[in-house]
Amino acid sequence: MRWYWPLATLLVAGCSQGAGDTAETAIPQASSAPALEQDFVLPPQSSPDPNPLDLPPTPIPEGLEKGQRIFAIPSEMLRDLTPGHVVEMQAAYFRGSEGNAMLVRIGFGPTYPVHPGYVVVPQQGRLGRGVRVIASYRGRLHHGIVTGLRRDRVLVMFTDLGFKLGDLRLDPKRIGKLGSGLVPGGFAVRSTEQGLAHVLLVSAAAHPDGKRRWLTVGHLGHTDLVEEEQLRPLPPKRLRLRKGDAVRAAWQGTMVPGTLRDFDRPGIYTVKRPRSGAPLLVGPGMIMPATDP
């Protein structure tokens, strides 16, 4: 039985050596963990350029109060913004000012600085039945018509959704009255190689070359800087249409020909296009007589 002792001694020595190797390799692994954590430290995010299109200086509208509702281009869309890029005018809050920039917050997101030219401030005014307004619908800028007043609320029918929606009771502080002519938040048309383009007006300013240009948002949110003389406001002055009149209505960013089929007072027009299916439901800022140049 003595021949078992050398074998047993070798087994014990091998086990002791294996345990020692395991302990030695475990020490470097434990000590390398802090180094890995230091390698993955993320730098803080930087705010986007508040004026990526290099718009001329524009004063911040007077009378703005902290917390007031406005419409602004989101910060992520301001990054590397150039003409042709897609943007949205989203409902936001005015949080103050920083130099010549406005401090804006959308929802529960971070506050960021932005040039006033990328913001639409709803204009307050006397509201009554038939007055054209802008207001927020699902967090976006939309157009509507006042249909009535109920105590401390205003009844608004949105006219640019493409379908009929019941009157909504809105806080007057969240509504902006649209004036006549070319105004921020209003609609306009411009002549292009593809025809008459339908655009949303954001802001205007005189550029260094002496020309006054509007920042516009077209079909699918495409931005552009357009000379003021190339724009015509919608609705045109004294818009008087009757059933059966030949008109042009906004459809996918272009004013297309059609026939006025019906008018749901005070502000939704039903337009039938030639050789097409469903009629178009448009508001006063989306229709014009076909005879207008």
Image (cartoon, rainbow, N blue to C red):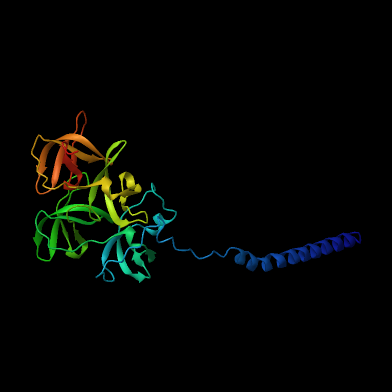
Left/right placement of residue 60 relative to residue 165 reads right
Q: Which residue is drawn at 26% across and 69% down?
A: 62
Quadrant of the image containing the N terminus:
bottom right
Image location of residue 203, percent across then percent down: 29, 56
The residue lying furthest to the right in this view is: 2
Q: Residue at x 36, y 53 (%)?
A: 209
Q: Nearer the viewer, residue 12 or 137?
A: 137
Left/right placement of residue 50 relative to residue 31 reads left
The residue lying furthest to the top in this view is: 275
Q: Which residue is drawn at 78% across and 62% down?
A: 18
Left/right placement of residue 172 relative to residue 253 reads left
The residue lying furthest to the front in this view is: 210
Q: Which of 183 and 185 is in front in this view?
A: 183
Image location of residue 30, percent across then percent down: 67, 67
Q: Nearer the viewer, residue 237 or 25?
A: 237
Quarter assignment of residue 102: bottom left
Establish if 138 lies above or below 264: below
Q: Can residue 106 be seen in this view?
A: no
Image location of residue 268, percent across then percent down: 14, 45
Image location of residue 60, percent across then percent down: 30, 66
